[in-house]
Image (cartoon, helix red, strand yellow):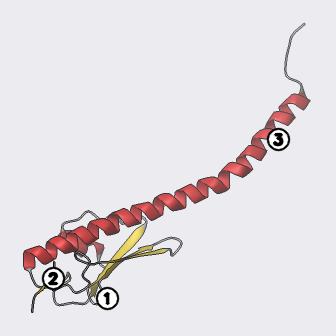
Amino acid sequence: MKKAFTLLELIVVVVIVGILATFAMPQFEITKERALDREAQGTLGLLRAAERAWFMEHNRTFYPPGGGTTSDPVAISRDLRVDLNTQNWTYTVDSGALQARARRTTGGRIRTLAIAFNGFANPGCIAGACLP
């Protein structure tokens, strides 16, 4: 006599797999959201470091020169010498508000990072010494 799975056993296995999948899918979405947020936070950290390097090189101002805001990732990447992953995000550097911002192109999620130098919000002050 041959041993084989009965139709009832196959249906039970399919139902169990379906139940497990309904628990796994929401968790997958949450994990994906966290990964995208961490990607944006990492890139914003690179922007903070690039802003510090810009200030040290030019000794006068935040990027973009003369204040203002830029949201062109290509210009930000070129001028600050950072590699911005723009697959899921657009980036903005705002020297007036002393912040860099990442906005997800799908879903509209926003991450903002205040840029400060050694704890000083004034871009002309580093380690207590302020520039004119």
Work out whether 130 lies above or below 7.
below
Quarter assignment of residue 118: bottom left
Q: Nearer the viewer, residue 131 or 91?
A: 131
Seen as rendered, the residue at the extreme front is 128
**CA separation in Å, label 1 and label 3:** 55 Å
**CA separation in Å, label 3 and label 2:** 66 Å
**Residue with the mark numbered 3:** 15
Name the secondary structure under disc 1.
Answer: loop
Q: Is residue 47 visible?
A: yes
Residue 129: image location, x then y, percent:
11, 84
Give the residue type that dot 1 points to: Ala
**Residue with the mark numbered 1:** 97
**Residue with the mark numbered 2:** 128
Tag nearer the camera, 1 or 2: 2
Horizontal relation, residue 54 to residue 23: left or right: left
Please identify the quadrant where the N terminus is shown.
Answer: top right
Residue 43: image location, x then y, percent:
33, 65
Say which residue appears at 24% left-offset and 82% top-offset.
120
Work out whether 117 lies above or below 69.
above
Give the residue type that dot 3 points to: Val
Name the secondary structure under disc 2.
Answer: loop
Name the secondary structure under disc 3.
Answer: helix
Specify few, some or many for label 2: CA neighbours under 10 Å numbering under 14, 14-19, or 20 or more.
Answer: few
